[in-house]
Image (tube, rainbow, N blue to C red):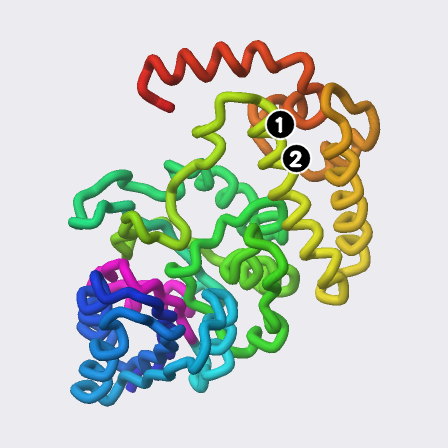
Amino acid sequence: MKEQIDVLLATYNGEKYLKEQLDSILNQTYQNIQLIISDDCSKDDTRNILKEYEEKDSRVKVYYQNENIGCIKNFEFLLKQVKNKIYMLSDQDDVWMPEKIEKIYEQLENEKADLIFGDLEVVDSNLETIYPSFNDFMKLSRKIKRHINTYELNYLYNCVTGCTIMSRKKWIDKILPLPVNSKYVLHDHWIGLMISLKGRLAYLPEKHIKYRQHEDNEVGTDKISHQFQQLEQVRELFIQVKLGVFGTYVEQQEKFPEELQQLNQKAYDYFTMLEKKKNFNFKGWYIFHRLYKGETFTYYIENFLIMNLPCLVRGLFQVRYYILKLMKKR
């Protein structure tokens, strides 16, 4: 008999799409699952829906939080409930393709991986395709291919989408506690990074999820920087993201090998310095190169100029923004 797999689902005010997602999980071709759900004090009909499914399917186990703990702590709670050797993460508003668990489990075992993640089909609220590939749209596919077996996969940016994850319980102690001090380091970012430091990650490019985008998404495909008309706004966002990321790493230094502990601190100091440099910076360029050397030449140069020599590209940024707006790409 196939081993049982735990599927972890965090819910909060998800009544609109929840039944469709629950049905897609419970009707998988791989049936030996335990669906573990934690509801974070929903105020809509979510809890009634969960009680209905718990009563009619013995594979469903629901926990009801007494106070709102937030998305990350809700997933941390779920990770602590894992009993089986293998677990998966799930969002409350997507739809899983019928063979998702079967295909991903097969790949996890074939590659002897500690964590496997995949791509998604991005759809609207009616499940109509918006983007055939989430990772292509977010320009992650090249990065995944280049860094799949190194910590760099999830070090500078997050390439692991949580709802595609299947992993092994033995790594949970190394993952927890999940950091909560920065909105730029979410649970999937941290899980992927922690396992990549000593474990093996694998990637399945096939899309086994319809990743629904709607007005209430916690995380989605919006590129915030595309809304900005001024270079200073983009630069400030980039710096704040990196301060959030490397600030979290510094706070969790004991989780990292010594070499990365030093890089974490240097990177945090570098981006702290950039906050005060409004026109140009000539210090710490070696840190920038250390972090961005694996990027494409265009991405490297664009980010280098924005970070270190914004005075040279303000005018070009303004022209580029209006051209893209005329082309309806902004």
Q: Residue 292 has which mark?
A: 2
Count of marks, rendered view:
2
Q: Is label 1 in contact with label 2 (beta carbons under 8 Å)?
A: yes
Task: Tell me which segment is drawn in magenta.
Answer: 87-109
Question: Circle 2 — which element?
Answer: helix
Question: Circle 1 — which element?
Answer: helix
Q: Residues within 10 Å of mark 2 (few under 14, many from 20)?
A: some
Question: Which quadrant: the N terminus?
Answer: bottom left
In this rendering, the answer to whether 84 lies above or below 296 is below
Q: What x and y, as percent, mark residue 120?
A: 32, 50
Residue 323 forms part of the magenta stretch:
no
Which of 285 and 4 lies nearest the eye of the viewer? 285
Q: What x and y, as percent, mark residue 309?
A: 71, 19
- Mark 1–mark 2 Cα distance, whole angstroms, equals 9 Å
Q: Is residue 273 left or right of residue 198?
A: right
Q: Residue 93 has which mark?
A: none
What residue lies at 73% left-to-right and 34% top-to-bottom? 275
Query: Residue 250 falls in which quadrant of the image?
Result: bottom right
What residue lies at 62% left-to-right and 14% top-to-bottom? 313
Q: What x and y, as percent, mark residue 195?
A: 58, 64
Q: Residue 303 has which mark?
A: 1
Q: What x and y, as percent, mark residue 173?
A: 61, 77
What residue lies at 79% left-to-right and 32% top-to-bottom? 286
In this rendering, the answer to whether 182 lies above or below 73 is above
